[in-house]
Every structure is written in structure tokens, then in C-alpha cells.
Image: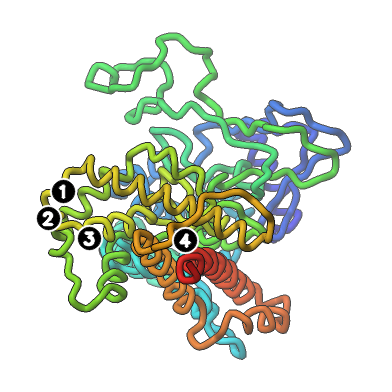
Amino acid sequence: MADSSAVTRLLSWCSERDFWIDPRIQVISGPCGVAVISQDTTIPAESILARIPRESVLSVKSSPISELIPPHPYGRGAQLSLALALSVELMRGAASPWFPYLKSLPREIPGIPLFWTSGAHCGDPTEWLNGTEAWKMLFESEENHASLFSEIDEYFHQVVQQVYSQVFESSSPAMVPSLHHFYYAYSLVSSRAFLVDSYHGLSMVPIADAFNHAQENHVHLESDFDVCPECGSLPRCLHDDTGDSVSRATAVPDDADDFYEMVSNLPIPPNTEVYNTYGGTLSNAELLVQYGFILDVNENDRLIWTFAELAQFSENYLPPSWTWDSVGGLSQFRALLDALISGPWESISASELVHRDRMHAFCLNGDATVSHGLWLYFALLLCLRNTTSPANRDPNAVIVLLEDMIQRQLTLELLHTNSASGLDISVPQLPDDPSPYSDMLELACLLASLCRARSASTGKPGVEMTELGDILDRLPNDMNSTRMAISLAMTERSLLDSCMSSWEGLAECLELA
């Protein structure tokens, strides 16, 4: 928490730098440094609550050592580069142009799982994250098979230390930032930085980062993103003649590109905290890893599988005699699957067990339904396995088989719903010989097994789902990291178990037929 004097110095610094803050809001000290509350009046939607000079943001471009920092426009590289710039300014202290702003930031590393430490009596909180989406983000990078922690350490030893040696060459060793200092800077970037425009890119934005997060947010940051990436100009400039593909106006208001604005997107009640959002589609796992908190209910929660994970699962759960050659080979199977996933599949929208997802190919959403890509993976596998020459199978013929499976599944879903509800509903009946539905039985069993296997590997090993609630109830309130980790594991296991139960119910319809 920032003390009141730090807030006073921050606001004085903002005034000197031509920030404008609406008098209907107040910046105060809060649990995460500073916070913003409304005053004694309702603030209408579409009100500008703050204007932040572009030149006041701390970015790699605005850093005094920008020429020493390897540029990265986005992703993890952008976070690491900005953390390097920020760490140098933090070490410079009062000599930094951003000193009053830096003093308003949290003094300790924010509680993101990357920097959780073991407690004397409660162990390592991250062990409760085992197998969760948060665990995968932290320790199972698909790109280079390296953990996030090792990426940061590698960047520190290969890039940061060289920069430090130049910037602090005349300083005593005690004045050279340490690895822990860089961790602190990285945690601030991870939990507070904004992507503001194509010139500054990822940046620390004073006042904008004082608005804490909520899904039902009151405000958002507005900026003209398509500025010149070379000089930051919004109007056309000399750099446009060198191949800049962005079309920008030749005449704009004089100060249009001088400020970023915090704008209300709905009415703000009086005497309440004013919230921004760090991303309207972020799951609890993403919020935890990047910002160090979770929501009690998050409709964006989802569990994701990679193609490699599904391929490994298939090898473990299909008969020992089965090989990828029996469906035309792994690479050909994936190419056909990728082409099929992009199709319309309108009929699948009638299913209560499958949803269409264009963002995540293989996932389970917060309603415990599988994505159409995940359904297609197993349905295609079974279709090809049951053909005589899968390598030569006409894709259009495969689509016909898959559409037939969808229709048969919809029939099964109606039967299962009717049986579970006890209502007298007229639905199509299974034939006397249900053998044509044998592939549907195997599909349901495979999806149930997929969920069961992942549920069993989620959370602390050896702890049953029924125990998690009791453990959570007994935890002291100050063990926040452990509480969040257990809550996340409980949520993911609950979704998996619910999905598993649904597919098992579908299988029972066939087994009883």
C-alpha cells in the first residue's frame, strides 16, 4: 500500500507534467499501491476521467537507455525489455524522471505465482496448481519447452547483466541491480503494463494503472494505436515515405496524439471504487499468472489441450494394436483436422455438450462443454480408423460421416435428457440393433476418459476432490496464495468432472439400449 505522502507526490508530479484528472474522482492509497474512487456524484458514461501525456509513459522507447535494450514489439520479449528499462529507473531513484510515480508502486513483488515462496507451515502454494492451466503457463511453454522462470533467468544472464555493466560501470557493486531486483521489475510489468500504441508498445502508464481490475469495469484506456512506429506521429510524417503501410490522416487536431485517455464506458455511482479491466476475456488462470488474483466466478474459465497432448492420450487409450498409420499418419491426420475445424459445422450448435470455438481449437469452457475442434479430433479419429483406406479418403466423404455422427449424437442427447427428466417427450428412438452407434459409444467413452485423466492429475497429488473444500475452509485467511491455488484447482476439476459425467451419461444410453 502506498502511503498518503506517496500519493501526494504522485499527484504533484502529474500536475507538473500536464496530466488532467477529473475532479469527480480521487486517487488514494490502496492495497496494491494506489486506487481510484468516485466522489459524491454519479459520473455519466463516455466521460473522460483522465488525460495522460504520451511523453509521460515509461517504455523502452522513452527510456534513457533505449539504445541498449534489444527491441521486442510484443509477447514475453516485450515484457522482459520493459522490465529492464523499469529496473534501471527504479535503481536510479530520485535521479529518475519517473521517481514520484515509481514511489507509488507496490514495494513488494506482487503476488503472482511465479514468485510465490514456501511458507514455514504450509509448503509451496504452487504444488496445488499442478496440472492446471496456470501450471501450464508457468512451467510448460509449448514454444521452447522452457519454464517462464527459466526464460526470465536466461534473459537476465544474457542481456540484462551486460546492460547493467554499461549503465552502472562507475557504481559500486552494491549499486548494481540484482536478479531479485529484476524479478521485482518484471512482476510490476506483468501486473501493470499497457499496450498503448505502435510506437511506445508495452508501457508503464501512470494514473491509468491506478484503476484496479474488475470484469464489470467502469473505464477503459483509449489511444490512437496506429501512430508512426519510428517517431510516434499520428499525422503522416517523413517515415511514411519509407514504406509505412499504415494509412494515417494528413491533418488532425494539434493535441490529438499527445494524450492517452481513461474514458468511462458506463455510469459510475458516487463513492465507489472505479475499475478498469485488464482484459475482458481473461480466465482465472490468466489473471492469476499475470496479475496475482482470481475472481470468485469467471465465465471465461477454460481448459486447453494441445494437439501433442491429444496425440499422446490417443496412444494410451486406444487398443495397443492401433497406430497412427492406421488413420493415414499423424501429419496427414492433423492437416485434415485443421481443415475441418475451420468449417461452419452449423448443426453442432444444437448440441448441449459441444460448443463452437474459433479461438481455442481443443478446449473445455466454463459451461463444461467441449469445443467443436476437440469433438472433431476424436470423431475424425474414429471415422478414419473404420475406413479401409484412410489416406485416400475423400475429405467430402469424411464430412458426410462426421455430419452423420453429429446427428446421431443429437438423437442420443435427446434420449438422455428425456430419460434424466422423466418427461414424456417425443424423440427419435434408437434402432433395435444399436450397433451403428458403437462409434458414438467409443467417442463418449474417450471424451469421458480424457476429462477423467486430466482431473486426476490436477492439483496436489494424492488429494481427492472431496477433500479440497475442507482444506480450503481450514486455511487461514492470510494464506492467500494457497487459497487461490486450491480454488483454481477446484474449479478446473469441477468442470472436468461435470463434462466427464455428461459423456458418461450419453454412453449409458447406448449401454442400456
Residue 386's mark?
A: 3
Closer to the chain start, of discs 4 and 2, is: 4
Residue type, mark 4 in image: Leu
Q: Give me the C-alpha separation between circle 3 and circle 1.
A: 11 Å
Q: In this rendering, which labeled residue sits more in front, label 4 or label 1?
A: 1
Residue name at image x 60 percent, y 30 percent: 261
Residue 30's mark?
A: none
Residue 393's mark?
A: 1
Of the pair 440 and 133, the residue shown nearer to us: 440
Closer to the chain start, of discs 4 and 1, is: 4
Residue 389's mark?
A: 2
Query: Extreme front residue here?
Result: 432
Residue name at image x 44 percent, y 72 percent: 454
Residue type, mark 2 in image: Ser
CB contact under 8 Å: marks 2 and 3: no
Q: Is residue 358 left or right of residue 338?
A: right
Secondary-structure class at tag 2: loop
CB contact under 8 Å: marks 1 and 2: yes
Image quadrant assignment for residue 417: bottom right
Q: Give me the C-alpha separation between circle 2 and circle 3.
A: 9 Å
Residue name at image x 88 percent, y 37 percent: 40
Q: Give me the C-alpha separation between circle 4 and circle 1.
A: 32 Å
Of the pair 77 and 258, the residue shown nearer to us: 77
Secondary-structure class at tag 3: loop
CB contact under 8 Å: marks 3 and 1: no
Q: Position of residue 51 (x, y in %)?
A: 62, 30
Residue name at image x 69 percent, y 52 percent: 34
Q: Position of residue 3 (x, y in %)?
A: 73, 58
Residue type, mark 1 in image: Arg
Residue 303's mark?
A: 4
Secondary-structure class at tag 1: loop
